[in-house]
Image (spheres, coloured by chain):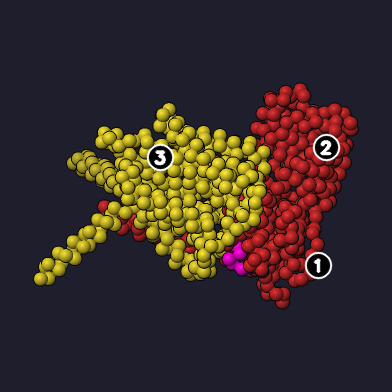
Chain colours: A yellow, B red
Amino acid sequence: MSNVRTTERTTAVGRARTVLARRTEGRAVALLVVVAIVAAVFEPVVFSSFPVVLGRLALIGLVALGLTALILLGELDLSVASTLALSGVVMASVPNLGLGIIAALITGIVVGLINAFFVVVVGINSFIATLGMLFALRGAAFVISAEKPVPLENIDAGIAFGSSLLGPLTPRVLLFFVIFAVLQILLSRTRIGREFYAVGGNRQAAIDVGIPVRRRLVLGFVISGVVAATAGIINTLELTAADPTAGSTVLLASFAAAIIGGVVLTGGRGTIVGTLLGALALSILQVVLTLSGVQVDIQDIFIGSILLVAIISDPSSLRTAWVRLRAAITRSRTRDTARGLTGNAADQ
Amino acid sequence: MRVSRITMGALSIAAASTILLSACSSSGTAGNNSADNGKKSYDVYALLPQGTDQPYGTTYLPPMKAEAAKDNIKLTITNSKYNADQQASECDVAVAAKPDLIVLWPAVGDTVRPCLAKAKAAGIPVTVTNSGVNKADVSLTKGFSGPDTYGQGVASAEIMCDITAGKDVGILVVNGLTGNSTATTRHDGFADTIAKKCPNVKILAEQPGNWNKDDSKIAVSEMLTSVGASKVQGIYAADDTMVAGAIDALKARGIDPAPLFITSIGNTKLGNPLVVSGELDGTVFQSSSWDGQHAIDLAYSVLTGGTVKDQFMPSVKVTKANATDPSVAPEW
């Protein structure tokens, strides 16, 4: 009887271990726990300021969600911040708010398609292609805005958009969670999502089994573009003006959220939930540091250090480091033994 | 594999804990805990777009902190690095912290209305420093202290009008960071005055130099190529850092800057020697210490219910005639 119980317990523990081993969000959870404890000790006001934390989460996390879908395919999009700025400027340049929002979303789709064209059809590396787009789109934002912020025609609509709908939920936060839910379902519950992982994990194998790799890549770039454009729309509404320089910190913050969330930059591994947790941990961290009066330069050092810890604590990095260390120790011991033998021979 | 995951988790938690604990424990020195001198103490958030990352911010902060210490004000200072989204988010944090007052230096003037509205709704007074807000938003603030940025553009243009003395000249214009309200108002002050007082001065081309010497050097070099160096007889740059870049660009082309008509704004440690040497014809004095000190001076007036009046820094013209005068000694 006790043997059966032990076996059942072992099996359950084994299953739990297997499930945990498959998850990639460990570092984000660890950071979140630490940040929450530090916040509880030093700045407990964070826990009564949900609108602030959720607002920061939506600011950091929204673009990161779209970017995660693309990174899972093994591609990068460095033009997201410029897409954000351009779509905001396009939106504010159209007098009718509804038409402006549609124009901004179309901008995001077009940018995604152009990026996809360069990467999928022309065959340029996505880092290079989207780097070029980063500059081109930022330039376009400056030209359209005549190098000045473009105020919304209806500023009151913008102010209303920034106010709470229910408790800490503002339209920005709600939109963030809607986009999160859509991408989570797409990537974890649909065939398309499984194909995203397959394309990012092993592109040749994905081609061999008949996955429409090119179409999935196009979809990934369009998702990234549309989500960045949505962030541009939200920013413009909340600030009541489109700033052509907007989004200057978005790119790095988005990558940081995804990396801390366990998304592997080479593709095929990671989750939208991980990115959400990474963005949440970073958001609470930034709010705590700001409330504590830590200067932004120092904040950057801490966030950079945590990012570094997240990267070097990746299991594959640790394994590689461990293997290299063991090899170095073995080599050193072999040399010492050889020297000892030579010394002994000389003594004789 | 299991061992590496456990190691990874432990390492992550240990490292993140160390980093965060050191951050928060060191933050005590970031605030300004003045000794109790019998005055009532106040909590004030200063939402700035620059700090020790810029020469102006570096010399703006010490007098600000000193004045705050004198008035028993505990300052929490943020730096959005001219990012409007970042400043909006910092404003949310400030409003949530419920300080006695917020000092706001707008990163982008057009985008601060929601921040001002939230502060007003929370009953937190806001004073504005260095760069003004839009006219429609002034009613949401308690007062302004800082340079008259439009007036600085006017003063620099007046120097240009004086030195060109009616001659037809073509000039290049190097503006500040695009979208920044100081950049916009200085440009407007300069352009309006040129059009009104000396239409003999023609703006041939203009580009942003982003308050940066290297960017300005590149911008001027490009403009010299595009309009033709022989057609250029002068340059206006929106600050001394950028005018130094512009002068470097001229020298790189083998052009002597001395005979050209060159004006700027700032009278900084970079610009003042150029005025003395004759390479820069004139600049406009901007005192960072005055700016930082008066930001708190105004805030304290609001907090104590004293008389609140907008405080404008005088726009003193600095030319070779007065460049060595101690009253205009450069500060940053």
Mark 1 lies on residue: B307
Between A214 and B220, the residue placed more toward the observer is A214
Residue A162 left/right relative to B297 = left
Q: Is residue B308 left or right of residue A1?
A: right
Marked residue nearer the N-terminal end (1 or 2):
2
Q: Please give the name of the residue rendered at 48% of the width and 42% of the height, measured from the top-left corner.
A: A225
Q: Position of residue B218 (x, y in %)?
A: 65, 32
Q: Which residues are magenta?
A: B94-99
Question: How far, Cα to Cα, is label 1 from label 2?
Answer: 37 Å
Task: Name which residue lies at 33% across and 43% down.
Answer: A192
Magenta span main SS: helix
| Residue type highlighted by circle 2 | Ile
Where A113 sits versus A50, above or below? Answer: above
For the residue carrying disc 3, how many other residues have a C-alpha within 10 Å: few (<14), some (14-19), or many (20+)? Answer: many
- Report helix, strand or loop for mark 1: loop
Which residue type does callout 1 highlight?
A: Thr
Q: Which mark is residue A219?
A: 3
A145 sits to left or right of B170: left
Q: Is residue B268 left or right of residue A79?
A: right
Q: In which quadrant of the rendered view does residue B115 lie?
A: bottom right
Q: Amino acid at mark 3?
A: Leu
Is the residue at mark 1 from the same chain as the one at mark 3? no
Circles 3 and 2, Cβ within 8 Å, touching? The answer is no
